Image (tube, rainbow, N blue to C red):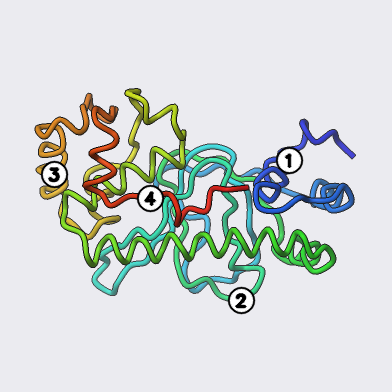
Amino acid sequence: MPRPDENPLARMVEKLGDRAPIPDKAIAAILQMPYVVKQLYRGDFFVREGATADKCGILTSGLTVFQKTNREGDRQILLVKITGDILGLQSLYLDTPDHNIQALTRCKIIVVPSELLKAISDHFVVVRDAISRIMLTEASMLRELILNIGRRDARARLAHFLCEFAVRTGGKDKINNRSFELPLTQEELGDALGLTAVHINRTLQLLSRDGLIARDGRNIRFVDWDRLQDIADFSTRYLHLEK
């Protein structure tokens, strides 16, 4: 068996370990799963709605989105999945995906058969608990999204998205007056927040004019993090970041 630090599935062990203490035997079982490395380019699909749900994986580089489209082709981005996240956990329990998973940037995904991870989770209760907590956190984030789109104005929606993205991708390193890259286009931000690209552009300008953020292309810097959090009604509680 390869050493954990040489096996890309160690990233999956790490992610599960954030939610529950994974015993050595379970770690060994996860690291022994067969896997393939899948490269995706921006716009490529990892999972398509209605297809067979037979794979999941760990995103080792890049960003993907969970999304749904209506019959007119309008898209709603539901979740942005970041490097280190596990994709496709729904396939452990449901036969058909009800959403798409699409690459937002160039991505690398370590793909494993769903049935094998399901078998490991059935054998090791703590693995099943970790998976359940990840899926429950995703559900919590979807509830926050419903609140964001349904009850916050455009400025609060966008401020909330920026706060969440910064916390999830870098924590305090991205908060304390440091810049970070926001790889979503204004159209994609609109798809995530139920706004037009034009409205997103105006709202970004408003946040800059109000002294809350500074922009340089796709780079965002928080000028007044505390006030931005207040405007966004942002709390990390729904992210369940505690380990």
Question: Up-down: is 166 above or below 123?
Answer: above
- Distance between mark 2 and mark 1 Cα atoms: 26 Å
| Sequence-first tag of 3 and 2 | 2
Which mark sits nearer the N-terminus, 3 or 4?
3
Q: Which secondary structure lies at badge 2? A: loop
The label shown at residue 108 is: none
The mark that comes first in sequence, 2 or 1, is 1
Secondary structure under tag 4 reads loop
Does 165 sit left or right of 21 as displayed?
A: left
Disc 4: which residue: 235
Between the residue at mark 3 and the residue at mark 1, the CA separation in whole angstroms equals: 40 Å
Q: Earlier in the sequence, mark 3 or mark 1?
A: 1
Quadrant in which residue 124 is drawn: bottom right
Residue designated by label 1: 10
Residue 90 locus on image (x, y percent): 58, 67
Rendered location of residue 43, percent (x, y):
39, 49
| Mark 1, secondary structure of its residue | helix
Front position in the image: 57 or 78: 78
- Amino acid type for the residue under numbered disc 1: Ala
Q: Residue 203, labelled with which disc?
A: 3
* Mark nearer the viewer, 2 or 4: 4
Pointer 2 residue: 95
Q: Choose between 202 and 141: the one closer to the eye.
A: 141
Against 5, residue 35 (above or below) is below
Mark 2, other Cα within 10 Å: few <14 / some 14–19 / many ≥20: few
**Among the two numbered marks 2 and 4 on one chain, the one whose residue lies closer to the N terminus:** 2
- Amino acid identity at mark 4: Ser
Q: Between tags 1 and 4, which lies in front?
A: 4
Distance from Cα at disc 1 to Cα at disc 4: 30 Å
Q: Residues within 10 Å of mark 4 (few under 14, many from 20)?
A: few
- Mark 2 → mark 4, Cα distance in angstroms: 34 Å
Q: Amino acid at mark 3?
A: Thr
